Image: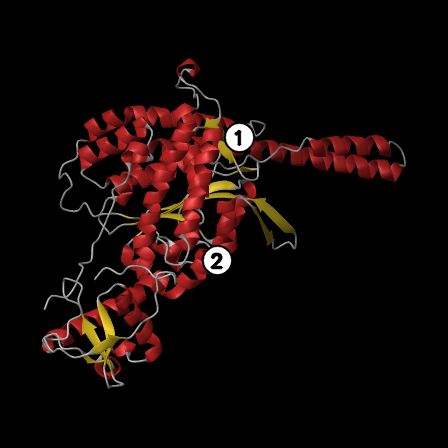
Amino acid sequence: MSLNKKTEKEHRTTFPLHCLPEQLKDTVERVNMFTGMSMELTINIIFTMLSIICQYLVGVVSPYSGIPGPCSLYLLTLAESGEGKTFLSRLLMRPFYSQIEKMQLEYRDRLTIYKRQHRIWKTSLQGFDANQRQAIKNGKGVEDAQVQLDEHYKGEPKRPVEPKFSYQDVTFKALIQGLSLHAEAGIIMDEAISFFRSGLKNHLGLLNKGWDGGKYSFDRTDGENYELPLCLMLSLMIQPGVFSNYLEKHGEMAKSSGLLARFLVMKVKSSIGQRNSRIDEEGLNAVLAPFYDHIQGLLSLLEARFYDDSIPKDQLRLSDDAKMFLQEKQREIEQAILPGGKYSHIRDFASKAIEQALRLATIMTFYLTKPTGGSSAADLIYTKIIDARQIRNAMTIVDWYLQQASDLFYPLSERYQFECEVRSLWSFIVKRLNKSQGIPFPKCELLQSGPGRLRHIDKLTPALNQLINQRLCCIIRYNGSSMLHIAGYYSNGSICTGGFPHNYSIVQMQNLKDEGFWHVDL
């Protein structure tokens, strides 16, 4: 006897490098060539830096509401220890950290000047206070003294704002304090175990609002209520095992809150054993020079806007062709998240795919076209328009991240659990039919000695119906008997009865094609 049987297939796609701007693509390939380290890891680190820079400089006008929104990203990178997370972060984000260090040194100088000026101002304040008290006492010149005091208050030196664009191991209290002064920042953790074990992960409202670009309300210790116009970027790198533990303990809360769905998730394919034992740092720095120069140009824009808040953010809009493309993709996604659809088990991730694509397209367009101090405006075309090509590229990249999320969260889905039950049942049926040389066996054996978790009619029926619907087996009743039997099929599609010419009838089962069932690979 030959029974129909399909083998399980695994399909893994590689990151669509061709969708990146040419210089970014070249950078990724060159880093991989010199180090042998994961290209995907390199990409997420580059996106981390671009997101934290661009969120301060540019936004995107929603094609649906017409309201400007942020382009910040939440990135979750799962990588084993030793994959080079810290090395690559320091290498690729060198311009960013150098710029922040420079601005920090300038801040300390400004702070020193401020403290000196404020001390002088405060000393003068004492004099004006004394003049006012004397005027009140004498009953003369009170109005003039008050005017002088008011003018002095107006001239109080302003404390410089610390250029805090990124946080690492930070508490909720410290983050709030920093964001109250500068509400656009990023949380970057190369070893994010501290995030998933800290209290910060529990403040889902703050983290969700940070991605949305909304206002976050909180009460200060002085009793006052404040609203922060947040714009946050998150880049978390963590070992898969630690993240699995987090999902077991807090995954339901994070999923139901929508926090996890805001992340572009990636599981890094290990490069251990394939990396270069000796890295040519001089050669690597040389090939990274064009990338560093371009990033430095963007950082100069960031610095200028930080010191002059009158400089507005650029706001990019979609071309008509780009809008039409997104509309079509939206229809595809709606189909994919229906029961039985490709992304039904990660519908929360897929529902944000369009927004993610808008943000990525904004970052890539801005990077590609924005004139900077190191570029000639004549060499660039900056129309503040995201064209159809860029949005298609961005959507292709988002589709790749969705596949990553699909693979990662699939084992937690009802669909996966059901498929496991179907495969377990099919394995039992095959073994039982082989044991009886193809002779059908009583259906009641499935409940008596079948897979343990299927020894209940409510569990057994859906799994058995799936196998029947895929024409892998069927239920028959011999004439003159009320007992139901499980029978297999020959390769030609005819029912196998073990060579016995019994008269039987097929028990018609429900057609499941319209019930949201999907094909199970066996």
| Disc number lying in front (2 or 1) | 2
**Residue 313 disc label:** 1
> What residue is at 85 percent from the left and 33 percent from the top?
143
Residue 134 placement, left or right of 17 = right
Q: Is residue 350 above or below residue 435?
A: above
Q: Amino acid at mark 1?
A: Lys
Total numbered labels: 2
Decide: few, some or many residues near mark 2? Use Cα within 10 Å; few <14, some 14-19, many ≥20.
few
* Residue 419, image x, y percentages: 28, 64
Which quarter of the image is occupied by the C terminus?
bottom left
74 or 19: nearer the viewer: 19
Q: Is residue 16 above or below residue 196?
A: above
Q: Secondary structure at mark 1?
A: loop
Which quarter of the image is occupied by the N terminus?
bottom left
Q: Amino acid at mark 2?
A: Ser
413 or 309: nearer the viewer: 413
